[in-house]
Image: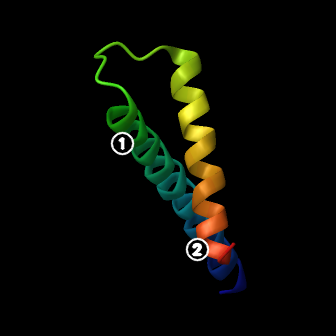
Amino acid sequence: MNSINITLIACLLWACSKWFMYYCSTRGLIYYLISEHNDYLENEKAKELTNMAVERTIKEFFGK
């Protein structure tokens, strides 16, 4: 029974991390659409926007 609980907690943490990354990626794309109306998004720009979204999301979560 204890191993089932540990497995479920591990799956929950994995699912939360995936949700967080999808949320930040979507938020980064929204920032991109707001700032520029270019249809072509470079790989480096996508990474930069995702990192910016991660930082802002963490700051907003902790109230800073």
Q: Residue 52: horizontal and vertical position, in percent?
A: 61, 43
Q: Which residue is mark 2?
A: 8
Q: Which residue: 36% across, 42% down?
A: 30
Horizontal relation, residue 29 to residue 20: left or right: left
For marks 1 and 2, the one nearer the N-term is: 2
Q: Nearer the viewer, residue 47 or 37?
A: 37
Q: Which residue: 59% across, 18% down?
A: 44
The image quadrant where one finds the C terminus is bottom right
The image quadrant where one finds the N terminus is bottom right
Q: Nearer the viewer, residue 17 or 4?
A: 17
Dot 1 falls on a residue whose secondary structure is helix
Q: Nearer the viewer, mark 1 or mark 2?
A: 1
Q: Which residue is mark 1?
A: 30
Badge 2, how many Cα within 10 Å: few under 14, some, many 20+? few
Q: Residue 59: horizontal and vertical position, in percent?
A: 66, 65
Badge 1, how many Cα within 10 Å: few under 14, some, many 20+? some
Q: Residue 46: horizontal and vertical position, in percent?
A: 51, 26
